[in-house]
Structure formats: C-alpha cells, structure tokens
Image (cartoon, rainbow, N blue to C red):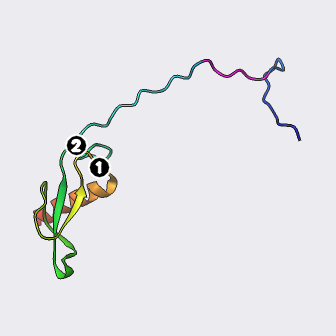
Amino acid sequence: MAARTSKDSAGQPEATPAATVRTQEYAAGTGWDVGQAAPKDAFRALGGEGMTTPVGPVVHEHPGGYARQIVTKGGLVTEGVKRELEAAERDGEA
C-alpha cells in the first residue's frame, strides 16, 4: 500500500515552511510560587509517635534530629511543595 501525501489544490505536495518561529521562553524566576525556583532550602522538623508527623515552622537550615526536606535551593516549587508550605503556615497560626 502506498503512503499518502497531502496535496494542495494544484496537485503539488505541501512545502515545508522555511522557518518556524519559536515563542520566547522565560524562566519563572525565584520565589515560593508554583513553577518558580526555590530561593532557599526548606525543612520541617518531624515529631510525634515514630517521628513521622511534621511539626513546627518551615526553617531554611536543617533543624537537627529528624526533619523532612521540602525543597532544595534552586529546586522547582511544585503543587506538593506549595501545599506543604501552606500547611506549615496554617499549623503555625493555630
């Protein structure tokens, strides 16, 4: 079976465009919003039974003992990172 080619109204195959213009891509910058690069490391201490429950505020240096690293400096802030940071903020207000 022969391969099909698309043809314009004159019966000629379509020509490939000479150049394709790419949209400019910009870095999202540094900050704590989703899609940005984290400006600092972010840790949260672990406590409770089995040392598995996040406790206390987010700190930017390892707090010692058991801790969870939420994001590294320069790492991409994802939905999960943002959710963890907001949860720590809410826990601090309670």
Residue 47, position in %: x, y?
A: 15, 75
Name the residue at the right extreme: 1
- Residue hosting label 1: 77
Lateral position of residue 87 relative to residue 78, left or right: left
Residue 75, position in %: x, y?
A: 28, 48
Q: Quadrant of residue 88?
A: bottom left
Q: Which sits in the foreground, 48 or 91?
A: 48
Q: CA separation, marks 1 and 2?
A: 8 Å
Dot 1 or dot 2: first in sequence order is 2
- The amino acid at mark 1 is Val
How crowded pointer 1 is (Cα within 10 Å; few <14, some 14-19, many 20+) is rated as: many
> Residue at left 35%, top 31%?
26
- Residue hosting label 2: 31
Q: Which sits in the foreground, 7 or 76?
A: 76
Residue 18, position in %: x, y?
A: 61, 17
Q: Main secondary structure of the magenta part?
A: loop
Q: Are marks 1 and 2 in contact (CB under 8 Å)?
A: yes
